[in-house]
Amino acid sequence: MPAFPFTAIVAQEEMKRALLIAAVDPSVGGVLVFGDRGTGKSTAIRALAALLPKIRAVAGCPYSCAPDAPAAECPHCAEGRGKSHLIPVPVVDLPLGATEDRVVGALDLERALTRGEKAFEPGLLARANRGFLYIDEVNLLEDHLVDLLLDVAASGVNTVEREGLSLRHPARFVLVGSGNPEEGELRPQLLDRFGLACEVGTPTDIATRIEVVRRRDAYERDPEGFCAAQAKPEKALQKTILSARERLRGVAVPDAVLEAAARLCLALGTDGLRGELTLMRTARAAAALDSADTVALSHLRQVAPSALRHRLRRNPLDESGSTARVARAVEEVLGAA
């Protein structure tokens, strides 16, 4: 069954915008989506992957290396590159119950037992290279897997030292997580690794709820026909993403925008400088999506909530939520829209 079209998703504009920004510039650092069950979180992530154009990869490479820029750490491409082919952008699910061997890779037992060879069987991190690693209920992920993800997300390389194996391979992916905040909080170290954090909620107006149900029912009754009807807007959005990627490098960030980003982070008391860096990268990608050559304060205003709401310290004297605190700071520092 084809994935539900991205352009057919009703409402949830902040989530859709964040995913598009991550698709334009993976260096933003991934997307975390928290909200109620049944609000389209998983649907949107899989729809985005289906929307993106196929990528060219070295044929036979388990890490899907690009033929024109193979990773230095790739043990397959180090032996010499062969033919290339087009493949869909990888979207790999990391289930909560996955073992460490399943995630990082391990000794290929079949080859070890039948041929007596020590060979590496790539894991989920290998399959996710150059694509998306999706973790549903990310706040319930076991601590030892969180530690693994933190190391790999920071370096872009998976290092395996076990069972007589010593190997490094590329593992650069966009980390996407979703969950329900009522089921537990995310560890601060992993929370900080997500560039953007979005909040989604159940629609409260009748018209939106009816449209969601109508579209989902039409898709389930005739998936091919429904997707065919959305082919034109899907193609147009794909062209917008490709154009934004090409434009991204040339988008200028004026000093006034950088100063505004720094003032905003100071006003909110964010730790370190990751807040400013993420704000800058996110605003630049947003400008590229808008076909702009220069980042404006309006772009900063637009992306500030998703870039900063998960970086705030707890303030026992302020009972308002993080989204309200960011909105208040944006108005104080940047002025009303």
Image (spheres, rainbow, N blue to C red):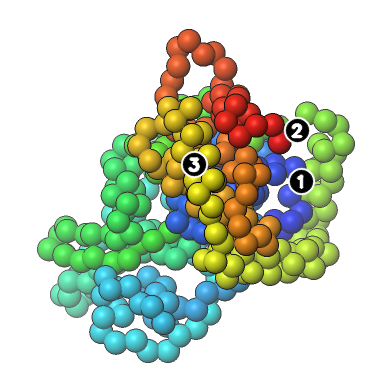
Q: Which label was assigned to residue 203?
A: 2
x, y percent for residue 224: 77, 66
Query: Mark 2 or mark 1, which has the lower sequence index?
Result: 1
Q: Which label was assigned to residue 50?
A: none
Quadrant in the picture for residue 146: top left
Residue 41 in sight from this viewpoint = no
Mark 1, other Cα within 10 Å: few <14 / some 14–19 / many ≥20: some
Residue 225 left/right relative to 325: right
Asked if the residue at tag 1 contacts the one at tag 3, i.e. Cβ–Cβ closer than 8 Å, the answer is no
Residue at the (52%, 74%) spot, across then down? 55
Quadrant in the picture for residue 243: bottom right
x, y percent for residue 188: 37, 32
Asked if the residue at tag 1 contacts the one at tag 2, i.e. Cβ–Cβ closer than 8 Å, the answer is yes
Dot 1 amino acid type: Val
How far apart marks 3 and 2 lie (CA) works out to 36 Å
Foreground label between 3 and 2: 3
* Quadrant of the rendering where the N terminus is positioned: bottom right
Residue at mark 1: 10
The single residue placed furthest to the top in the displayed view is: 317
Which is nearer the eye, 258 or 50? 258
Foreground label between 3 and 1: 3
